[in-house]
Image: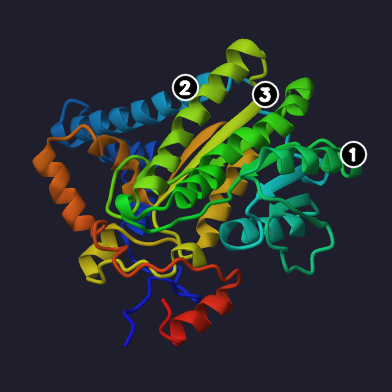
Amino acid sequence: MSAPSSYDPAPIYDSVDIDMVVKVLSQTAFSPFFTCFIPIFYIFQGYEFVNPVVLIPSIYCAAVSAFWLLKWISQLYRNQGSFFFKPKPLDWSEQIVVITGGASGVGELLANTLAVRNVTVVVLDVKPIVTENYNIVYYQCDVSKWEEVEAVSKKIIDEIGQPTMLVNNAGVVQGKLIIDLKPEDVYQTFGVNTLAHFWTLKAFLPGMIKNKTGHIVTMSSVVGFVGCVRMADYNASKAALMIINESLRYELDKVYDAPGIRTTIVCPGHILTPLFSTVQLPSNPFFQFFVPSIAPVTVVKAIITALDAQQSQTIFLPFYTNFSPVVRMIPSYLRDICQKFSGADYSMRNFTKVTARRPDEVDLLVANGKD
């Protein structure tokens, strides 16, 4: 009998986990608006300001407010924003969004969600997207090959127009030990996961620079910060995207004087998509509470929110991924404890590369014990 798969075609989106707790706390105990009422309440009760029941909540409120102020200033500086004026509301009907790997998983859901907003969506994939949305246009393209990207990009610009947003979402995973990786495996991983970003940027970025506006979304991963067994090529390909995104930001700001072109990088944990349908993660409640898997809709919501906000962002999903950059800086014995708790070194033991495009096809594979 095959082991249970981590892919769930109908996940429970409202399960209680650390992300839900953090979300509630951010609107209550860690919210300046909420905490400021605590000392005010005691003052209205007749307590003096120097009284500890007033002074301590006041200090806590000031600390929380300072944290949010620094976060706001950082975001303001990063986006060359104005203290008085926000960007004009985004007119989605004028956007042309190119999505690589848009025929399945997160890319497919993002394409269909944007299409509902009357957005012109262009999907680049080796397999066609099955959709009823008339404003989704599909172009067959192996994004790992510059010649194909160059040819398709010219057709897109001529037939549809200059893209205003680019979502580099295409990805593959081999799930093999380093010595078991064939040369073609490594070439494919870096071709799709890394080199494709260079090719699409070369193809579509010049038009954005000319117009001084646009948005580039880079789909990286939390494993770009950490290494694990049977994922060396995938981890390395995702780690490279961190530097590509950062270098791109500085080139746009310092060379092209185009701060209006936003750059967002997404670093998610395990997503419940067919790509990682055969990954086996710990099933104990403690792990699922602190290291939950996320549904594709959660990632799509975050991407659309970032696009709508017209601000460069680094998106970590779920909450535990915010600590992934710190893991590399802690002592090795603590690092090994984190690695053991994550189960990352054993999650790919029975991994089988799934080439099925649709979730229902993956269900069929799992039911037949081919996971």
Relative to 247, is 178 above or below? below
Q: How far from the left and from the top, in percent, is residue 180?
A: 34, 56
Towards the viewer: 194 or 286: 194
Answer whether residue 330 is visible to the viewer in this image: yes
268 lies left or right of 249: left
Q: Which amino acid does label 3 sit on?
A: Gly
Q: Which quadrant: the C terminus?
A: bottom left
Given contact means CB atoms under 8 Å apart, are the residues at marks 2 and 3 in contact? no
In the picture, the disc for residue 185 is none
- Residue at 90% x, 44% y is 159
Circle 2 — which element?
A: helix
Q: Which amino acid does label 1 sit on?
A: Asp
Label 3 belongs to which residue? Answer: 260
Label 2 belongs to which residue? Answer: 73
Q: How far from the left and from the top, in percent, is residue 173?
A: 45, 56
10 Å crowding of disc 1: few (<14), some (14-19), many (20+): few
Where, by quadrant of the figure, is residue 323 drawn? top left
303 lies left or right of 211: left
Relative to 88, is 23 above or below? below
Circle 3 — which element?
A: loop
Q: How far from the left and from the top, in percent, is residue 361?
A: 57, 78
- The answer for how far apart the CA atoms under marks 2 and 3 are is 18 Å
Q: Nearer the viewer, mark 1 or mark 3?
A: 1
Pick out the residue farthest to the left: 333
Answer whether residue 83 is visible to the viewer in this image: no
10 Å crowding of disc 3: few (<14), some (14-19), many (20+): many
Label 1 belongs to which residue? Answer: 158
Q: How far from the left and from the top, in percent, is residue 96?
A: 78, 43
Q: Which amino acid does label 2 sit on?
A: Ile
- Residue at 17% x, 25% y is 50
- The answer for how far apart the CA atoms under marks 1 and 2 are is 41 Å
